[in-house]
């Protein structure tokens, strides 16, 4: 089976990471972990976008060379990925020689094929977004000011010479390709948006070079010493450079095409218009196009997108290490919040209250309570051993069992459409059901009966449910999942998605581990 190859965008290292960046990262991490749990081989690529005018300007403002600056800021990203338990397989920086070599090889190939056009042009340019806009795309601000449609800041008229990839030449191909592959871009709203766009005449030119005198910090263009590569061409090529396009044919053949490029909706056009056209111009066939590009929504503060340039960012380090400092699994609380709060694809509003309420209700009250009550009853009434099903199952037990074994199919269906919120909802519905089961069965009453047979069945049902929940949570909350696994006494036993549908899987007389509070109330210490 082909290795599941999934990517995140390369993050700009012009300022420290914020919640928006960590969102893409946590989502892709959960997806990669899910596929690994299903027994697939996975290659998860991430990295940093380190060239271009924005970086050059930020370095200058910080009084550093661009290289020293990107090294420093880049470290904040890798530290955050470590804090959030991000399990990437490779990390590519666009300033690495292995990447720059491939960018140059791609440019040279396009040039040799005669696929590039040289010209002098004039256009409206947004410096912060590093994007040219057509007259029709611009918006008008107060007093008739001409503004960038993406960030609403003033654009400038710029004249320069450069090399471009003619977009219209590939337009008919792209329209046909999109029609045949309706799931190429997801969710469907984004697909429709793109289809609308490509049915209008596209701008003629996608400039892939910049004059060196304006932007010095970039990949030199091999056939034109006075130009560097446009940062977006440079960055997009990472998806093939990191896996050895033109340099490691065996590795490339094993991984390409990418199964999923996950991005935010602000960079939809770059990934669904420019990227396929670049690949097509390089000679990639329809079968060699990425399988899916999924654009998620934005985290907003109030009505505005959270962004470095708008100055309204929430610092993920603050949330995990400050706001959640009492939590032994703070990173998982944060991951849970991001994935559960908003259906993937839609926008969400971040607030400290929202995260606190998810922690109190879903995590401490529902999940924490279920684990704590079940394991403490197993200790108290059964000496810490899972007693087994000697007494057989009754309809209530059977209903919960069926709910638990059905989770496998629910998770696979939710993850097939990257619906993380739905996956978590399925897991937490089982958790609530199990809590209701405890109330209905009242094991503390059963413990008073002459025979303990019924009590044993109920506690064994609960132990199996905890096992299922621990496995199911692994992609999303790896730390909590591992802690539950330890508390269940499963230690080094491998976790596999296929074991979700096994029941019973715990041996009778299996000994559970030692307990600990998963989600302590603020101000109390975890035991
Ligand atoms: N460097 C480019 C991507 C090149 S990929 C070949 C870039 N970088 S970025 O750092 O600005 O953004 C990286 C990712 O973070 C994008 O997916 C973007 O959508 C996401 N987010 C940035 N702000 C965001 C929010 N406020 N909310 C959610 N995600 C957003 O673009």
Image (spheres, rainbow, N blue to C red):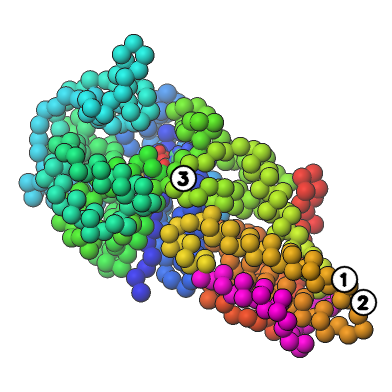
* 255 drawn magenta: no
Most distant residue in the front direction: 395
Quadrant including the N terminus:
bottom left
Looking at the picture, does residue 112 appear above or below residue 245?
A: above
- In the rendered image, which residue does mark 3 sit on? 346
- In the rendered image, which residue does mark 1 sit on? 444
How crowded pointer 1 is (Cα within 10 Å; few <14, some 14-19, many 20+) is rated as: few
Q: In the image, ligand 1 is in what quadrant?
A: top left
Residue 384 pos. (x, y %): 81, 76
Q: Is residue 215 left or right of residue 421?
A: left
**Between marks 1 and 3, how big is the CA–CA gap?**
44 Å
Label 3 element class = loop
- Is residue 74 at all visible to an observer of this figure? no
Give the residues drawn in magenta, as a range. 380-409
- In the rendered image, which residue does mark 2 sit on? 448
How crowded pointer 3 is (Cα within 10 Å; few <14, some 14-19, many 20+) is rated as: few
Most distant residue in the top direction: 143
């Amino acid at each position: 089976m082909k290795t599941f190859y999934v990517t995140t965008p390369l993050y700009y290292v012009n300022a420290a990471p914020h919640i928006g960046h960590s969102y893409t990262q946590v989502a892709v991490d959960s997806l990669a972990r899910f596929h690994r749990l299903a027994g697939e081989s996975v290659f998860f690529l991430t990295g940093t976008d380190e060239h271009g005018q924005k970086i050059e300007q930020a370095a200058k403002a910080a009084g550093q060379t661009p290289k020293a600056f990107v090294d420093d800021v880049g470290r904040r990203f890798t530290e955050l990925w470590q804090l959030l338990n991000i399990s990437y397989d490779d990390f590519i920086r666009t300033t690495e020689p292995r990447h720059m070599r491939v960018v140059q090889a791609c440019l040279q190939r396009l040039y040799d094929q005669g696929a590039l056009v040289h010209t002098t042009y004039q256009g409206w340019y947004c410096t912060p977004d590093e994007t040219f806009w057509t007259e029709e795309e611009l918006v008008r601000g107060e007093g008739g000011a001409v503004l960038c449609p993406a960030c609403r800041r003033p654009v400038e008229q710029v004249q320069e010479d450069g090399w471009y990839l003619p977009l219209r030449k590939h337009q008919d191909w792209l329209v046909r390709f999109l029609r045949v592959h309706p799931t190429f871009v997801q969710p469907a709203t984004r697909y429709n948006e793109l289809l609308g766009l490509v049915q209008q005449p596209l701008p003629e030119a996608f400039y892939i070079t910049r004059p060196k005198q304006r932007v010095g910090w970039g990949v030199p263009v091999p056939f034109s010493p006075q130009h560097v590569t446009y940062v977006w061409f440079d960055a997009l090529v990472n998806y093939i450079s990191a896996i050895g396009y033109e340099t490691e044919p065996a590795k490339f053949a094993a991984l390409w095409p990418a199964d999923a490029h996950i991005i935010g909706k602000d960079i939809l056009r770059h990934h669904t218009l420019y990227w396929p056209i670049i690949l097509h111009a390089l000679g990639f066939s329809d079968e060699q196009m990425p399988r899916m590009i999924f654009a998620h929504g934005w985290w907003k503060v109030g009505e505005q997108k959270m962004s470095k340039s708008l100055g309204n960012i929430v610092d993920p380090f603050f949330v995990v290490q400050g706001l959640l400092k009492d939590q032994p699994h703070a990173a998982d609380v944060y991951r849970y919040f991001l994935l559960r709060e908003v259906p993937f694809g839609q926008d969400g509003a971040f607030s400290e209250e929202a995260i606190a309420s998810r922690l109190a209700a879903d995590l401490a009250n529902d999940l924490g309570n279920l684990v704590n009550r079940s394991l403490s009853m197993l200790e108290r009434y059964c000496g810490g051993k899972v007693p087994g099903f000697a007494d057989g199952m009754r309809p209530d037990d059977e209903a919960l069992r069926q709910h638990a074994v059905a989770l496998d199919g629910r998770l696979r269906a939710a993850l097939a459409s990257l619906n993380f919120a739905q996956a978590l909802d399925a897991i937490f519905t089982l958790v609530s059901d199990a809590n209701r089961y405890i109330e209905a069965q009242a094991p503390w009453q059963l413990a008073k009966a002459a025979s303990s047979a019924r009590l044993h069945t109920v506690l064994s049902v609960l132990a199996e449910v905890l096992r299922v929940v621990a496995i199911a949570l692994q992609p999303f909350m790896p730390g909590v999942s591992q802690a539950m696994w330890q508390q269940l006494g499963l230690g080094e036993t491998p976790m596999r998605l296929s074991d979700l549908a096994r029941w019973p899987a715990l041996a009778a007389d299996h000994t559970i581990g030692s307990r600990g509070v998963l989600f302590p109330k603020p101000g109390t210490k975890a035991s």
